[in-house]
Image (tube, helix red, strand yellow):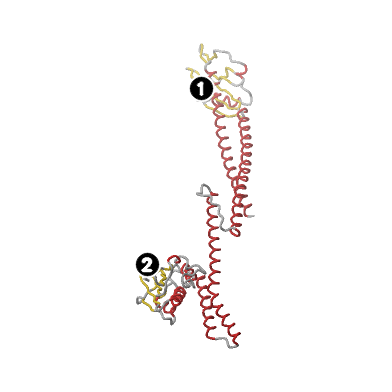
Amino acid sequence: MAVTGFRSRVVALTVLIATAVVAILVVVSHVLLSRVTDTDAHDLARTRAEAVAANVTAKGGRVVLTENSSEALDEVAWVYADGRLIDGNVPPSVVDRVEELADSERSQTASVGNYLLYARKVPIDGHHVMVIVRVDLTPYETSEQRSLALSLILGGLTILLAGGVAHLVVHRALRVVHEMAALADDWGHHEPGRRFNLGVPRDEFGELGRTLDHLLERVDNALADERRLTDEIAHELRTPLTVLRAEAQLAQLSGGPVPTEAVLSEVDRLDAAITTLLRAARARTDKGTRCDLRSAARQAIAGRAVEVAFPAKVEVAVAADVAVSLLSPLLDNGLRHAKSRVWITARLQGEAIVVDVLDDGPGFDPADVDRVFEAGVSGGDGYGLGLPVVRRIAASAGAEVRAIADGRGHVEVTLPAARATA
């Protein structure tokens, strides 16, 4: 319905514009033709009057014609001398107007019915001589009417042709757009890796193809992000669930009670993992959000044997719960793989605060530093637990996290520093 409506609007607009253009052209051409025919009629009248005036002269004190005019000329040209008709036959329908022109003192034109009258004064000493000619305007008006009718017919055909061409062009253009949209939708569901790849846009369709490629890229990234989230959830929840199952099976085989402390510990671990994943999904960098990094670090440590080397007060532009969710999994990894010591430091770097989570364990393999944040990937002695979630939270909060292979456990978190308030 939307496509049909758009096509109809384009065709209607084209017809409207074509109608306006044709109307203007018809009016302008008719006005120009009227001026041309008027000019031709006046030129013909002047030519006739000059031809007759050339034969008028004075002899013996009288005004006479040197040559006898034809009968045909007598019907369209008349000569008046001193108020008296001396040549020609004036039709009764125009006699009053002709005599009025004959009495005038200057050359002029007048219209009577479908006739143009032109009076020309002939300079003859001692006499008042006027030559009056008549031009029939009927042929000129007929020519104007025929030209107007032909212009209207051609204009109507032009309007119909413009509407038809617009309908055809828009139909073909929209068909291409519809096909591209259908292909993009199908690829987005079944082949997200496919692209139009039309190269540098040369027209609107090239721009549409590039836009659809970007849209497909975002869809592909969203699907990949969804798969990563699923992997992260499975990765984070599998270990505590396995421990709970093992404890339950052990209690069942031994006939003893289920160890409450172990069960509560793993349930807490499950709850922490779910909470962290929810924070990762909801984390956003809002304007004005800030927290005391030292306080957030203490919450993340929560009684763990971790050394803290922070300045007196460090504020970052992230929410406190987000900072805790970032640091807790890193501290867990450090404690799990440290030999004897885990510590955390903070330093100012430009407009950011860099937090280093360190331990004296084996550290990361240089070949794995770019892969340790992928779900299910672990390096060396088991690094990787919780790191995919850390990466997701960092990306959502406008932070950056990376592993550093320097012979010890070292993860660097770069957080935006909070701006000083006025």
Q: Is residue 333 visible?
A: yes
Regarding mark 2 in the picture, which secondary structure is present there? loop
Q: Which residue is mark 2?
A: 351
Mark 1 burial class by Cα count in 10 Å: few <14, some 14-19, many 20+: many
178 vs 401, nearest the viewer? 401
Q: Position of residue 326 (x, y in %)?
A: 45, 73
The reply, left or right, for residue 270 in relation to residue 350 is: right
Q: Position of residue 53 (x, y in %)?
A: 53, 18
The residue sitting at 53% across, 65% down in the picture is: 225
- Hey, which residue is sitting farthest bottom in the picture? 256
Q: Amino acid at mark 1?
A: Lys
In the picture, the quarter occupied by the C terminus is: bottom left
285 vs 55, nearest the viewer? 285
Q: Is residue 321 visible?
A: no
Regarding mark 1 in the picture, which secondary structure is present there? strand
Q: Position of residue 74 (x, y in %)?
A: 60, 18
The answer to whether residue 158 is above or below residue 59 is below
407 vs 389, nearest the viewer? 407
Whether the residues at callouts 2 and 1 have beta carbons within 8 Å, the answer is no
176 vs 308, nearest the viewer? 308
Mark 2 and mark 1 lie on one chain; the one further toward the N terminus is 1
Disc sitting over residue 26 in the figure: none
Q: CA distance from mark 2 to mark 1?
A: 100 Å
- Hey, which residue is sitting farthest top in the picture? 60
In the picture, the quarter occupied by the N terminus is: bottom right
Mark 2 burial class by Cα count in 10 Å: few <14, some 14-19, many 20+: few
Q: Amino acid at mark 2?
A: Glu
The answer to whether residue 180 is above or below residue 46 is below
Disc sitting over residue 121 in the figure: 1
Q: Position of residue 16 (x, y in %)?
A: 59, 45
The residue sitting at 47% across, 66% down in the picture is: 371
The reply, left or right, for residue 298 in relation to residue 29 is: left
